[in-house]
Amino acid sequence: MGEVIRRTQRGRFIGYYLRWYEQGRRRQMASKQPTYAEARRMLQAIEGRIARGLCGLDTPSARTATVNELCERFLIEYSRPRMKDLTKYRAHARTALRRALPMLGALRADAVRPNDIARLRDALARRMAPNSVRVTVSFLGTMFTWAMKLGILADNPVRGVELPQRQDAIEYLSHDEVRALLTAAARRAESRDLDDRLLEVCVATALHTGLRKGELFGLRWTDLDLNTRRLDVMRSGEKLPKGGKPRHLRLPSALIPILQEWRQRCPRTKEGLVFPVGTGRMGRHGEMLDLERVLEQAGCPPLERAWHALRHTFASHYIMSGGNILALQKILGHSNIKHSLIYAHLAPDFLGDEMERIRFRV
């Protein structure tokens, strides 16, 4: 028997979802129905089709479905048990797959071949960054693999197609630029405006800890002990940190007086947030806290991802100051050391005298 699930997010109703079993697999999808009764009728129709030996969803057959239609079904049905934020994943997937649809959308899904994917890759590469091309092709690969597991397709045309080389660009600020940014943020905070003071403290915390933007905005006063200098990174926003595990750090001494003073002025929230940006302001522009304008006022170069560049700044200067790459992995919460190794070349003794090991005698 299936069931209708009433879904909410942050206390807000987002829709009725259907869950049922088909061929031994649990299936789930958004009903897109306005009432429980209509969602229930939709579920009963699905169960009726299954009882007649048909596919539960009344969708185009496997051999006639286009890539457009397969994409829509994928964006409704696909999920993984360990996925942290399904809504966010589907939004990213939709954005990435939309880039492929002008070239592939009208094709039958079972007619797509590796050379079609290669032509798409080359066309996208002429106008997009390599990492963006990689993301689009990777989402296509995930979609085709999912379709294979459901028995919709016999093969994944993305398999074996070479992807562009990943570009690990590191945006970070120099010592002089960091000083200029902190000075500009402090100057704005002199106005006594609470938002300006919040920005100043948030920037200082990001530069001294390397926390991700979501980890900053998810930080609570219960995660800090200013006396013992304890910092527990327990969440990113309202979810677990990236990687799915909390981490425990020691607060830098330079931050203690800054956070002590901010605690007296920090607006109270029921969650006890250290940086209460507020749900009304969250989003691409609301959560920036005017950082981009302060960077401009400080004379810093334009940054593609301003908050993440502060994380890069922490990591880069940590390594340039002789920090250990394995310790950096723990500080930043990287699940894989390869993510930390992008900073290795900044170490003052990078490769050191290694090139002197080989000497040929004549």
Image (cartoon, rainbow, N blue to C red):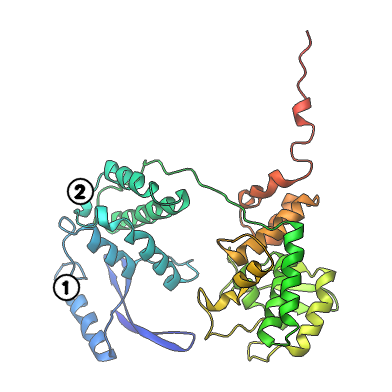
Earlier in the chain: of badge 2 and badge 1, it is 1
Instruction: Provide the residue designation for mark 1.
Output: 49
State the residue in front, 74 or 21: 74
Residue 172 occupies quadrant:
bottom right
Residue drawn at x 24%, y 61% is 68
Q: Is residue 222 visible?
A: no
Q: Would you place residue 345 above or below residue 30 in this image?
A: above
Point out residue 306 in the picture as x, y percentages from the top left corner: 60, 65
Q: Amino acid at mark 1?
A: Arg
Point out residue 328 in the picture as x, y percentages from the top left corner: 72, 56
Residue drawn at x 43%, y 67% is 89
Residue 36 occupies quadrant:
bottom left
Residue drawn at x 47%, y 89% is 11
Label for residue 361? none
The quarter in which the C terminus is drawn is top right
Instruction: Provide the residue designation for mark 2.
Output: 111
Q: Nearer the viewer, mark 2 or mark 1?
A: 2
